[in-house]
Image (cartoon, rainbow, N blue to C red):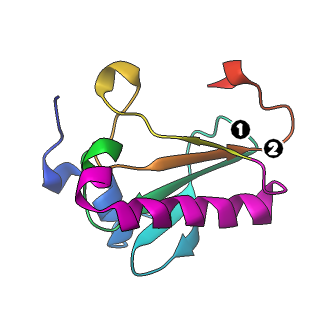
Amino acid sequence: MSEAPREEDLFLRIIAGEVPADVVHSDDVVVAFRDIAPKAATHVLVVPRTRYPDVTALAAASPQTLAHVVAVAQRIADAECGGQFRLVFNTGAAVGQTVFHVHAHVLGGEGLSFTDL
């Protein structure tokens, strides 16, 4: 898998406050912010502060962090789209991963269909 060097990691720059973002949640484990190119009425990224290249690496190294990502996704969905949401992790460039720092896409809102990805 092709992986971006750490210093080029956009999400680390957002977490550090070097790049502005519309942050909706922040704690010691994750930062959640609105996607700049939303695919749904609610489209928020939940990003661990510690860098893992993809969800499989996160699950292997820190299942408790993965569980926290999912819990934060649920809180965001509860607040923004009635608790119903789609949670998407892209793993690999061929399926659309462009930042190789694991992140969950929280997608929800009216009219979201399976083909909307």
Q: CA distance from mark 2 to mark 1?
A: 7 Å
Q: Position of residue 67 (x, y in %)?
A: 47, 62
The foreground one among 28 and 6 is 28
Q: Position of residue 42 (x, y in %)?
A: 71, 48
Q: What residue does disc 1 label?
A: 40
Q: Residue at left 38%, top 66%?
A: 65
The foreground one among 64 and 109 is 64
Residues at discs 2 and 1 in contact (Cβ within 8 Å): yes
Q: Position of residue 104 (x, y in %)?
A: 49, 49
**Relative to 3, is 90 on the left or the right?**
right
Dot label at residue 54: none
Q: Could you say which quadrant of the image residue 3 lies in?
A: top left
Dot 2: what SS?
loop
Q: Residue at left 39%, top 74%?
A: 29
Q: What residue does disc 2 label?
A: 109
**Relative to 78, is 32 on the left or the right?**
left
Q: Residue at left 77%, top 66%?
A: 79
**Relative to 99, is 8 on the left or the right?**
left
Q: Amino acid at mark 2?
A: Gly
User: Reading the chain from its start, which is encountered first: label 2 or label 1?
Assistant: 1
Q: Amino acid at mark 1?
A: Ala
**Which quadrant is home to the C terminus?**
top right
Residue stretch rendered in magenta on the structure = 58-84
